Image (cartoon, rainbow, N blue to C red):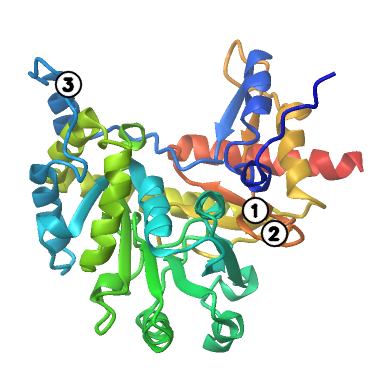
Amino acid sequence: MNTPLQISQRGLEMPASPIRKLAPLAAEAEDRGVKIYRLNIGQPDLPTPKKALEALKHIDRETLEYSPSQGYKSLRQALVSYYERYQIKLSPDDIIVTSGGSEAVLFAFMSCLNPGDEIIVPEPAYANYMALAVSAGAVIRTVTTTIDEGFCLPKVEKFEELINERTKAILICNPNNPTGYLYTQKEMNRIRDLVKKHNLYLFSDEVYREFIYTGSPYISAMHLEGIEQNVVLIDSVSKRYSECGIRIGALITKNAEVRKTVMKFCQARLSPPLIGQIVAEASIEGTEEYSRDVYEEYVERRKCLIDGVNRIPGCYTPIPMGAFYTVAKLPVDDTEKFCAWCLQEFCWKDEHTPQGCEGETVMMAPAAGFYTDPELGKDQVRLAYVLCKKDLRRAIFILSKAIEAYNARQ
């Protein structure tokens, strides 16, 4: 009898996505005729800019060819103009187009880190950072932020405690996914000083810069003086133009050696998506009114969700200042179990349930998956306010009924 083939250690260490791992349960619920309000994933329901869709419809190429490995120069030049709006001065050569922001993170890790090197990340953090670190052989070390303190950055001493000879980088997401937290100028200066003191890379994921709901300014890592060679900025068009499916991101750095190394990985994967680049380039200029309308819609959705969640007995979420996520504390014993139960066993039906529907439920992302310690976040979920206000209000109502039913059964 043959010995079973072994799975790689890397594969065993790869975490399941807290955002997508409940998808099979959701599919089964939908097969039963249940309507699901999906608050688990940052997939906006807003339309893509018409200008971008027109560019897609009128592609006149006879051959859909490989693009340059670093992306088309016309797209990179358009991005230069885009970043100028945020006082970020770049040249097209500073920008490398990637297959989504996730590839930009992966290529940054693989270009700047050796296996076993450590990255310090404030948590809760976007779960794919952990998965991408495993792919690159890097190690995530976390400093924990708390919901009771609004997820503000811990003191410098907490970072210093983790720094050793293997520490090579700090990774931030600003505005933050999953918490919606926006780093202040003071906090960004503290990060800058740490990076400078220990000569670290600063990986800065800034894909949600359009979605800032406070008078505080947006502080990019590219604005920080004295660490220009240390910064690697991660970006994506997915969220700001509702174009998640075209898979266009960017890795941006002033460090020529990093760009040279990243290009080797870009060449190995050949090229970023051709059609995606065409759509992305069409989205950048002439869509200012679209962006204002989208922003105003998210302002209203944020208020709708936050007010609604905080009215549910036992629930609490701080007010997020950016992105379109929040982390909420729920009065349940374990949100992993609760979120699965909502899809497997709970189904609400009343006079407002759509005709022909067997009932309704809500899908959320258990927050434990955004922490490295499995004991943290067990009473928390990440909620994405990417649905229209009518659906958000209905989802919040159903969540309240689900909490009541879940706790009553115990």
Category of crowding for the residue at label 1, using alpha-carbon neighbours closer than 10 angstroms: few (below 14), some (14–19), many (at least 20): many
Do residues under tags 1 and 3 come within 8 Å of each other at their CB atoms?
no
Residue 16's place in the image compared with 216, above or below, is: above
How many numbered discs?
3
Q: Residue at x 13, y 68 (%)?
A: 89
Q: Residue at x 43, y 85 (%)?
A: 198
Q: Nearer the viewer, residue 232 or 353?
A: 232
Q: CA distance from mark 2 to mark 3?
A: 46 Å
Do residues under tags 2 and 1 come within 8 Å of each other at their CB atoms?
yes
- Residue farthest top in this picture: 356
Mark 3: which amino acid?
Answer: Leu
**Mark 2 highlights which residue?**
377
Label 1 secondary element = helix
Residue 64: which disc?
3
Q: CA distance from mark 1 to mark 3?
A: 41 Å
Q: Nearer the viewer, residue 153 or 2?
A: 2
What percent of the width, then of the height, locates residue 351? 64, 22
Category of crowding for the residue at label 3, using alpha-carbon neighbours closer than 10 angstroms: few (below 14), some (14–19), many (at least 20): few
Q: Is residue 43 left or right of residue 218?
A: right
Quarter of the N terminus within the rendering = top right
Q: Nearer the viewer, residue 145 or 215?
A: 145
Residue 106's place in the image compared with 45, above or below, is: below
Tell which circle, 2 or 1, labels the residue nearer the N-terminal end: 1
Please indicate, yes or no, whether residue 323 appears anywhere in the rendered image. Answer: no
**Mark 1 highlights which residue?**
367
Label 3 secondary element = loop
